[in-house]
Amino acid sequence: MKMVMAVVPRDDTEGVLQALVAAGHTATFVESRGGVLREAKKMLFIAVRDQDLDQVLAIIEDSCHCQEQAAPGGSERGPLSPEPAPVAAEMGGTAVFVWDLDHFEIY
């Protein structure tokens, strides 16, 4: 078995969960914050059989989206401003971690 932890933007979480459930998988989640703008995220934990790993990863990939946004301050100054110019940063998106799960039980 594998444990999949996906750190998903809050706006994408419901779509990921619905797609996982529709495919016969379950997940639990916890709230978190992170990234450049300290965006709200949810960490999904999905225990999955080895043979289902590729399907779960495809569901996550298909359900999550990146977008480019302006993030505060690079090192260069704005054209008419003493403040650093915003820099384009890829926001959103999902980080996925997979590791071996030696033991799994439900009580």
Image: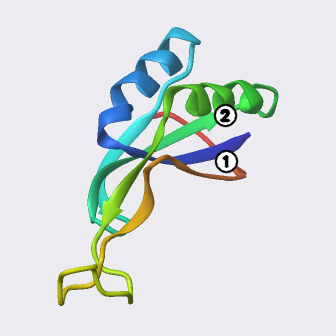
Residue 70, compared with residue 82, is above or below; it is above
Q: Of helix, strand and loop, which one carries label 1? A: loop
Work out which quarter of the rendered image holds the N terminus and state it: top right
Q: Is residue 27 above or below residue 98?
A: above
Q: Residue at x 20, y 85 (%)?
A: 83
Residue visible at 32% across and 48% down?
A: 30
Residue 17 drawn at (x, y percent) = 42, 25
Compared across the picture, whether 17 is left or right of 54 comes to left
Question: Mark 1 touching mark 2, by CB under 8 A?
Answer: no
Query: From mark 1 to mark 2, how far is it between C-alphas?
Result: 21 Å
Give the left or right position of residue 72, taking residue 66 as reference.
Answer: left
Which residue is depicted at the point 51% across and 47% down? 94
**Residue 13: horizontal and vertical position, in percent?**
37, 33
Q: On residue 57, which mark appears? A: 2
Q: Earlier in the sequence, mark 1 or mark 2?
A: 2
> Mark number for residue 103?
1
Foreground pick, 59 / 87: 87
- Taking the spot 40% from the left edge, 37% from the top edge, the residue there is 28
